[in-house]
Amino acid sequence: MATGPLRFRTPHIDELPATQSRQAPGFAWVAVSGAQNDPSKSWGTTNRKRARASVGGQTDQQREALSARQQREVERRIRDLNSDNSKDVVIELPRKPGTASAVKAGKTTNTKKILASGKNFAHYLDDEEAEIARTGRREGEGEALPQPQRASKTPLARRKTREDSSMSISPAPSSNSMGPPPLPRGVNGSAGASMQDDNAEEDDDYSFGMPSEADIEALLSLPPLTYSQARAAPPPPTVPPRRRFCETCGYWGRVKCMKCGTMTCSVACKDVHDLDRCLKMYA
Amino acid sequence: MARPKSVSSAPISGDLADKTLVLDNGAHTIKAGLAVGHAENEPSLHDCHVIPNVIARSQRDKRTYIGPEYSECLDFGELAYKRPVEKGFIVNWEGEKAIWERSFFDKNAAVLQCVPEETNLILTEAPNSPTALQRHADEMVFEEFGFAGYYRTIAPTLNAYAPSPFPSTSISAPGIPVECLLVVDAGHSHTTITPLYQGRPFQAAIRRLEVGGKTLTNQMKELISRTFDVHREDHIVGEIKEDVCFVSQDFNRDLEKVWKGGRYDPREIDASVVVDYVLPDYETIKRGFARPHDPKANLRNIMLGIGTEGGRREHVLTIGNERFVVPELLFRPSDIGMQQDGICGTILQAINALPEVLRQAYLANIVVVGGTSKLPGFVERLEAGLRGMVDVDLVVRVARAGDLVKNVWLGGARMAQNEELVKSLLGILHKARYIET
């Protein structure tokens, strides 16, 4: 609006040809496509704030960034929920009276190293994944797996440090290249679908009784999955979407805050939210 | 057992220590006890000691409580925690060694006396361990502690040796595993689903849901902190969870019951769900407790000690829908945005990874263990949920183990009584053989 010649805010009116409308003297009803696409509505009178809030970002990039931010937020929260040790607190073990302080604990070099190691579980997990990505097999396993291929398609350089979050989609064991050799009979990823499929044959199969000892032995001697492969897969897409709860009282979330997106259940709870919980000053 | 390196089935000759320390090394508590090889009587749960597996530092009395000393603590307010076991694996061996020494090996050990050189060890770990951690465990057990024999196994397998909780199944002799068992282990860090055949796991079908007791406690902390800040009170919130939480059988109905109503249509709140929880102050109230909700109570007066029993000052929390919203995470992890199926769906994922012929057998032999499954209504909801997800003509049977916390230990102790089995298993990792390799 700032550039260009001065424009008067007088709309130019002309009669549009409309197929659906009944001919009436003087004017015709037409279908208006919406605020964004209609140039006659965007003469400085648009509420840009509202337009942005209604679709969650003006452009595709903005919308993507917004959802990525929410995703990160959720991941961080889950990590916090699953964390155990107190943060920012270093607990020193009191020394035993007999031991000299200079001597490291441990009897052999191996155990000295283990005892002094300050690694946490996420480090070990990263180590193992890197090992698999590099050699195609786990430490201590005899031969390489059939297809030595990286577990993740993300290039190593761009891969984020994995902090053991459950947001990363769990690989369905049969589809993953790092997985064990596929099981002999019907292994399906999705629970609901395969159960229904199988039930038709269930009775027939039952008459054959147990599988042979050799089959079971083969299944039992499969190597264990890696830590991230054993993670439960996401539910099938048919389940209802995520439930939202009121941030103030925990009842169903029915109203979304226009500024920050949290849910509340009623006017009373929304007031509490607006007063001192809504952390976003400017939407 | 996950290391095929030194597997040779030849049992070691004769000189087997006849005491076995069965150590179920959980992230929250250690379940430990000695089993004697050829004893006539069955191992009893009295021999199993539950030790907090934690190192806690109190800001108030500036003391560090290690393992068994934790129970001496008089003021659990604002403790800082460090747990040597993360996600079910011993990660911090320095801390774990300190706890084990205070519990078993020291001269004046708090729990039981044990000389490693004359004892075998059965140690449990969580399924799907990184191999580096398994190697560390083996090295520590032999090189640092020097146990005579050692068998490391994933914890759920030992449940096959415990007495079967199904009334129709006869109790097997000690050391003989149940044929088919699907173990649902709802622990502190996560919930694992393990199908067992003759006491051996189908490794490719083990699944893990990353919601455990710790997740629930932390979620409880978040929800209570909406009205009263308890972010630093892990112990108290854990107690609140154990005291008042339950698994709702009909979530929507329960949530409806405790809604306070809108601004102009206040409702009667169902008093059967809402409770008042009196927080401990560690002076007059040593442990918090729940009592029926009193809507007319003036919390400020109560806090000042006006109109209370004996005039003591009480901090009262009103707990309503938190009681069942928190355990609901086990069944709907998507409520916090977690991209995993609930516990029922996870069980079906594990079952579907098995051959079709075996599926019915496992669906009808589900056993629930682990501290989180102590939540009232857990087994009923699990059974109802599974029932609704599978076909009508399949049988679904879910049973609660006799002692949810000590069941793994009991299985391990019964296994240790079968000398032949112990010999063959310990043969896999015997000290002499370890030194050779």
Image (spheres, coloured by chain):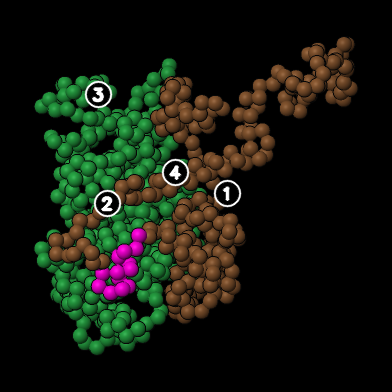
Seen at 36% across and 69% down, the residue is B134
Q: Which residue lies furthest to the front in this view?
A: A102
Q: Is residue A145 above or below residue B339?
A: below
Q: Position of residue B425 (x, y in %)?
A: 30, 78
Chain name for mark 4 = A
Sequence-wise, the earlier of marks 1 and 4 is 4
Q: Circle 1 sits in a helix, a strand or a loop, which is it?
A: loop
The three-letter amino acid code for the residue at tag 2 is Ile
Residue pictured at 37% horizontal, 32% vertical: B226
- Report the span colored magenta: A105-118
Residue B299: assigned label: 3
Q: Position of residue B204 (x, y in %)?
A: 47, 68
Q: Is mark 3 on a helix, strand or loop?
A: helix
Residue type marked 4: Arg
> What residue does disc 4 label?
A77
Q: Are marks 2 and 4 in contact (CB under 8 Å)?
A: no
Q: Mark 2 points at which residue?
A: A91
Crowding near pointer 4: few (<14 within 10 Å), some, many (20+)?
A: some
Residue A185 seen in render: no
Q: How far apart are marks 1 and 4 (CA)?
A: 23 Å
Q: Mark 1 sits on what residue?
A: A237
